[in-house]
Image: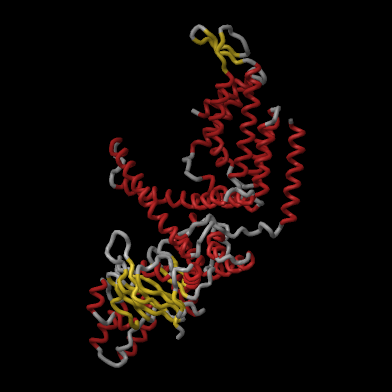
Amino acid sequence: MRELLKTERLCFQYEERYPALSGVSAAFHAGERIAVLGGNGAGKSTFFLCCNGVLRPQSGKIFWKGQEITNAKQDVTLLRQSVGLVFQDPDSQIIAGTVEQEVSFGPMNLRLSQEEVIDRVDQSLRKMNLEGYERRAPHYLSGGEKKRVSVADILAMKPEMILLDEPTASLDPENVSTLEHTLDDLSESGITLLVSTHDVDFAYRFASRAIVFSQGKILMDSAMDDAFASENILREAGLKKPLLYAAAEIIGQHFPSEAARRKPRSMEEFQEYIQQVSL
Amino acid sequence: MSGILIALFIGIMLYGRVPWLLLAALCLGAAVLITLGRHRNTRFLTIDVLAQVSRLNRVSADLKFWTAIALTAVCASARSPATGVFLTVLMFLLIVCVGGLNPRDYLRLLALPASFLALSGLAMLFEISAQGVGIIRVPFFGTWLCVTEEARNRAVIVTTRAFGAIGCLYMLSLTTPTPDLIGVLRRTHCPDVLIDLMYLIYRDIFLMLSMYRAMRDAAKSRLGYVNYPTQVRTMGNLYANLLACGYQKAKRNFDAMESRCFDAGVRFLERGTTAKAPARAAAHTAAAIGIVGLSVLLR
């Protein structure tokens, strides 16, 4: 897999606090689905802001497709354009008075032609099921709709990688499931997705790789199943096992077999798992 | 209160000009209308909501803007009360019949400026004089409060002008969402920094308002408004907190703008500003001819 983004020993400290990031190194490849796990204040959001070029790390390096991102304007623009960041609270992200204007903000900043901007805005609105919302005011939309607008914002910039900061926070179950479908579509279209969350069930369903953050450091960077195998890591990061994972573990202890090793990710897989284990 | 004011104003304006019964009916009618309008709770930012749903909100904002400005100018310079009355009726028809606004909502919005106009009209009508002259004379501590024919004519002109102008401005603000209006100002080459601020402030009004509501409700639920001293203290804390939260929110907002390659100037797509240029030009010319004709006819 082609390497897209790489960080090397990133350190960042806000004025008033202890280090938010201390020596974070990670590499992300094309088409990956990665969950960034960790409790509140673990450094996930700061890491995302650094990866997108909004915050400049005090030390450490960021590479995009092997090219080091310096402080030069064109480097930072390249990073912001290639790595889209969807903020946790859509209200912190949305600045325009209509949905169409909002989605056009990024493409307009890229100095694209009017036709290209219209084309991209229409495409992203269609992709996020927001057709007919063009002239609606964002402040009269529901939470789920605002979230879709905030994702459409980023899609219109055609990034190769999207970072989503706590995308499921404050969404109802139906909107979470819509969001998951959208993320699946985006992933299938080849976009690398990096999702920060403390919703372990969602992370377990969605991602194939997990990066666990705690106190500004990466505790673990592994395949999803391995991340939940270590009790120590989970305790240190303040996380719990996903419900399906824990249930499968208990069943596996009572009926040890080869089939019990592969843990189910979804309810459908869980049903299959039960059938195989009970055979 | 505003119903009484308006009834009084209309009564004096028409006193001696129409039969008693009709006069009484008109006063009562106006008072009831205004009271009806005021009866529903006024919600903040109603105008913004109404503009969003108006059937006229798809009509070119440039056309509405320039028409409203031109008609306001025509109205303000009119020498006959007919202009103001005509424009008031025309705008009512445009906003309510064409735009699809509920007449009660329109009445509610008119109630406040109408009572203000009635109050200023009453102030213009009465003068204090040593001798009782004029159409209406009221003894007042050894002198007289009088309404002369001249004062009445002046008041009629001023109030109809003002009412017509209010109608024109309501036509603009009740059918044009704010972002469209800012777009018009951008095309008139208003300084960019002002335009950027307008866009951001428009959005921030709603953010601050929802933050304020959340904090107010949280304070209410903890008896923060239980008596006057507590209320004052709560308000103080709330505004201080609002300032701090607003500042943090602005910082996050700026981060989000930067993450989408913001460098200088807030730019948005303005669709359709070039697409139907000939149609727009034709509409503008027609409107201009109409306005010039109207101003010549009605002066």
Nearest the viewer among A210 and B189 is B189
Count up the numbered dots: 0
Q: Residue at x 30, y 79 (%)?
A: A220
Looking at the image, which residue is at 56% across and 10% down? B129
Instruction: Check the picture and name the quadrant holding the N terminus of chain A.
Output: bottom left
In the image, residue B100 sits, relative to residue A170, either above or below, namely: above
Coordinates of residue A278 in the picture (x, y in percent): 30, 89
Q: Residue at x 65, y 35 (%)?
A: B88
Residue A270 in sight here: no
Q: Quadrant of the C terminus of chain A?
A: bottom left
Residue drawn at 39 percent across, 48 percent down: B213
**In the image, residue A205 lies at what x, y percent?**
38, 78
Vertical relation: B65 (above or below) A86: above
Image quadrant assignment for residue B23: top right
Q: Nearer the viewer, residue B17 or A236?
A: A236
Horizontal side of residue B158 vs A40, given as left or right: right
Place of residue A118 in the rendered image (x, y in percent of width and height, measured from the top left)? 61, 65
Residue B257 locus on image (x, y percent): 47, 61
Q: Is residue B297 left or right of residue B143?
A: right
Give the answer, above or below, for where A267 lies relative to B43: below
- In the image, is residue A167 above or below residue B174? below
